[in-house]
Image: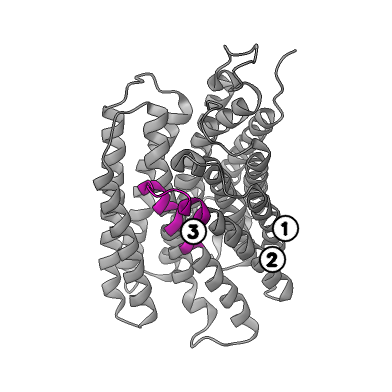
Amino acid sequence: MPQSQPHTPPAFVLPFYGYAALSLLVALGLLWWSVPNLDGHYFQPKILGIVHLMALGWGSMMILGASHQLLPVLLGKTLYSNKLAMSSFVLAAIGIPMLVMRFMQFQFDGLALTGAGFIILAIVAFFINVIKNMQQQPRRAVHVWFILAATIWLLLTMLLGWLLLYNFSHPILPNSSLHYLSLHAHIGLSGWFLLLIMGVGSRLIPMFLISQINDNKTLWYIFILMNASLLAFTCIFLCGVSRIFIAIPFTGILTSMILFARYVRHAYQQRVRYSIDAPMKLSLVSVLLILLPSLLLAAVLLLQTTASTDVMTTLVKLYGFLLFFGWLSTLIIGMTFKTLPFIVWSQHYSKAATTHQQINPADLVQHRTVKNMMLLYATGLVLFAISLAAQTMWLLHMAAAILLLAGVVYTWLVFQLIAHQPAK
């Protein structure tokens, strides 16, 4: 990243990457440890803990770190407050393990509420940075509106989650907390992860492909359709309307995903750089991987009144696994080795006076090891999905071990980059 281009100092971004990598490693370890519990219902302590560690410690921390780096690039202004960025990291870093540990112990008490409260404050700190940065720039790129809207949905998701925790011990909502889990999960998955990844991905993917695409109209269509569908889903859920109407927002979100996939295809077709490295290939494949959990969700909606409890439980577990460990993780793993090298490069090699000007961000990546790690992860992912659907326990153990090994290599690669120092 050129020194003349606004960017956030790496010291305020790299901690997010390191924390996210460790969270993925711990989550994969917990997945391997929890294999004997995977033949039961999905609402149980270990699965709750793993899901929230993947969503908050892995996915959200990595995305928050990348967003702090990307905001100045999108707006052409330095980040409003580095202190708020660090506050966001510290608050989330404290709150996430507090919340996850209480989920693992199946205790929805004051400690869990405090952990969730810290995470909410972390999101508020990030939200302030986004708002203040937008106020400094009259011409705001559509990508920034995606980030703003996604942050609002994340904040709503966490506030609802806090209420559900409180409602377990002090009933204040019209229904039990379990009734609202679907709303909590899907506004988080679609409103935070999917919306933000569409916004950030629509900027990063063309940038790394060196694509000439310029189709803001499609991005605005996606933005409006996604948010309208999420609002419709929330209203249908809360108003007690027949669940058959959920097909309307589901169709809207699916249409948005198809439009985004088409946008990525056009960016690929209009690229200047024809050779594509392994991380970029994995990120492009992950765009297609979102279709698998979408089809599973459609099956859940269609079969919920006819299929047996065992079939529905298996479908829901497979849906969650492919969302977090499939689509989300493959996308983040791929983009890690595109964004992190730039951040490290900007820290050590971007000054014009450096004697290491010949060093490029790609030179910091151990490409063969990254490629082997990705193949290892893909193997474990496919085997785990098959064995989860077939409920083959020995294969689940083996697949989880392969995923864990890939996680060890990934974490090592990330910390190798973070600790990089120029050769003397």
Task: Kindly identify which residue carries mark 2.
Answer: 115
Magenta stretch: includes residue 153? yes
Mark 1, Cα crowd under 10 Å, few <14 / some 14-19 / many 20+, is: some
Residue drawn at x 62%, y 55% is 53
- The residue beneath circle 1 is 94
The Cα atoms of the two marked residues, 3 and 2, are separated by 19 Å
Work out how far the residue at label 1 is from the one at label 3, CA to CA, in angstroms: 20 Å
Give the residue type that dot 3 points to.
Thr
Where disc 1 sits, the SS reads: helix
Which type of secondary structure does the marked residue at label 3 adopt? Answer: helix
Q: Quadrant of residue 69?
A: top right
The residue under label 3 is 151
> Residues at badges 2 and 1 in contact (C-beta under 8 Å)?
yes
Query: Which structural element holds mark 2?
Result: helix
Q: Earlier in the sequence, mark 1 or mark 3?
A: 1
Residue 94 position in % (x across, y down): 72, 58
Label 2 and label 1: CA atoms lie apart by 7 Å
Q: Which residues are magenta?
A: 130-154
Which class describes the residues within 10 Å of circle 3: few (<14), some (14-19), or many (20+)?
many
Q: Main secondary structure of the magenta part?
A: helix
The amino acid type found where label 1 is placed reads: Ile
Measuring 44% from the left and 41% from the top, which residue is drawn there?
74
**Could you tell me the amino acid type at mark 2?**
Gly
Say which of 298 and 172 sits in front.
172
The reply to whether callout 3 and callout 2 are in contact (CB within 8 Å) is no
Foreground mark, 3 or 2? 3
Queried whether the magenta region covers residue 49, the answer comes back as no
